[in-house]
């Protein structure tokens, strides 16, 4: 396991407030994810989950108004996304982007070289990538195609998991990895994640539904509403959500009926 002065690599979000186009979305988030742990972050549409993932990775357009993001003891709140990635953070996006004219293998080699801070030879990289492909049961044909162009929803998400495997981050944020997947694709993606989960990787799995957690077992489950984490417990919390629904949790906690932070923001 990678170590720093405090042990495992740790992502810590402290009293994080953030806005988009002047609209406050995050209203005081506190969260700690350590290397080797799997956390699930659940919540209804508009609660701010995807906004949190984008703020953690430093995506432009999101303004932090208070609080901080700490990774391995360093305040990275003002660092650009590429610097956060170099330090060992990774974000699998809810809606992966197409990159016409660029093959998956060339894209991954460029990203891998950037993370390592130096060019990586074609043969050395191919050997590294092939080992990850074999682990995930990904065929050669996929990596020779242009990035996400003509990919099915399941192929796009499996490509994200391949990126995760190749880049070897210490903490990965998986934003709505189950979004738009049928049950067979969901199982394939979950199997890929489970191949990678272990002492070297901490995961923050963002999802609306308990179904993803049938295949990926979290250590901790958080419920997010109205831009805040309102409840944290063990895996049983996901089952409680399945039984009660978000309305039941909202009523239990005495929260206002409208949990939508901003219907115009994909969160």
Image: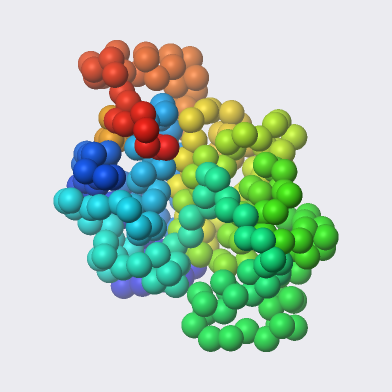
Could you tell whether 123 is left or right of 17 in the image? Answer: right
Of the pair 145 and 253, the residue shown nearer to us: 145
Above or below residue 28? Residue 55 is: below
The quadrant the C terminus occupies is top left
Residue 255: x, y in percent? Answer: 24, 19
Of the pair 187 and 92, the residue shown nearer to us: 92
Q: How many marks?
A: 0
User: Does the rendering let one see residue 7?
Assistant: no
Residue 80: x, y in percent? Answer: 35, 67
Could you tell whether 68 is left or right of 166 in the image? Answer: left
Residue 11: x, y in percent? Answer: 35, 57
Residue drawn where x is 21% and y is 43% of the image:
22
Residue drawn where x is 36% and y is 44% of the image:
51
Of the pair 72 and 126, the residue shown nearer to us: 126
User: Quick one: which residue is furthest to the left in this view?
Assistant: 66
Q: How is the image coloured?
A: rainbow
Residue drawn where x is 57% and y is 79% of the image:
113
Could you tell whether 133 is left or right of 89 in the image? Answer: right
Residue 164: x, y in percent? Answer: 58, 60
Q: Quadrant of residue 144?
A: bottom right
Residue drawn where x is 52% and y is 49% of the image:
93
Above or below residue 206? Residue 111 is: below
Above or below residue 67? Residue 88 is: below
Above or below residue 17? Residue 159 is: below
Q: Quadrant of residue 8?
A: bottom left
User: Does the rendering let one see residue 127?
Assistant: yes
């Amino acid at each position: 396991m990678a170590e720093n002065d405090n042990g495992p690599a740790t992502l810590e979000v402290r009293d994080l407030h953030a806005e988009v186009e002047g609209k406050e979305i995050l209203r005081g988030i506190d969260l700690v994810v350590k290397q080797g742990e799997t956390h699930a972050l659940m919540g209804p549409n508009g609660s701010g989950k995807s906004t949190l993932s984008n703020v953690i990775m430093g995506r432009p357009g999101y303004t932090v108004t208070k609080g901080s993001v700490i990774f391995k003891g360093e305040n990275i709140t003002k660092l650009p996304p590429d610097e956060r990635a170099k330090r060992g953070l990774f974000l699998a996006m809810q809606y992966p982007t197409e990159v016409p004219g660029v093959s998956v293998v060339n894209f991954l080699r460029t990203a891998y070289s950037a993370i390592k801070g130096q060019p990586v030879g074609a043969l050395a990289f191919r050997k590294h990538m092939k080992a990850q492909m074999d682990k995930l049961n990904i065929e050669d044909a996929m990596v020779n195609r242009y990035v996400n162009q003509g990919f099915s929803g399941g192929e796009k998400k499996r490509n994200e998991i391949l990126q995760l495997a190749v880049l070897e981050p210490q903490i990965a944020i998986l934003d709505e990895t189950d979004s738009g997947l049928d049950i067979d694709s969901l199982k394939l993606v979950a199997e890929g994640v489970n191949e990678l989960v272990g002492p070297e990787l901490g995961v923050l799995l963002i999802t609306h539904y308990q179904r993803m957690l049938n295949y990926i077992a979290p250590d901790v489950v958080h419920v997010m509403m109205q831009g805040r984490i309102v409840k944290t417990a063990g895996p049983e919390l996901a089952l409680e959500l399945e039984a009660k629904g978000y309305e039941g949790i909202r009523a239990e906690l005495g929260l206002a009926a409208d949990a939508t932070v901003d219907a115009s923001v994909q969160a």
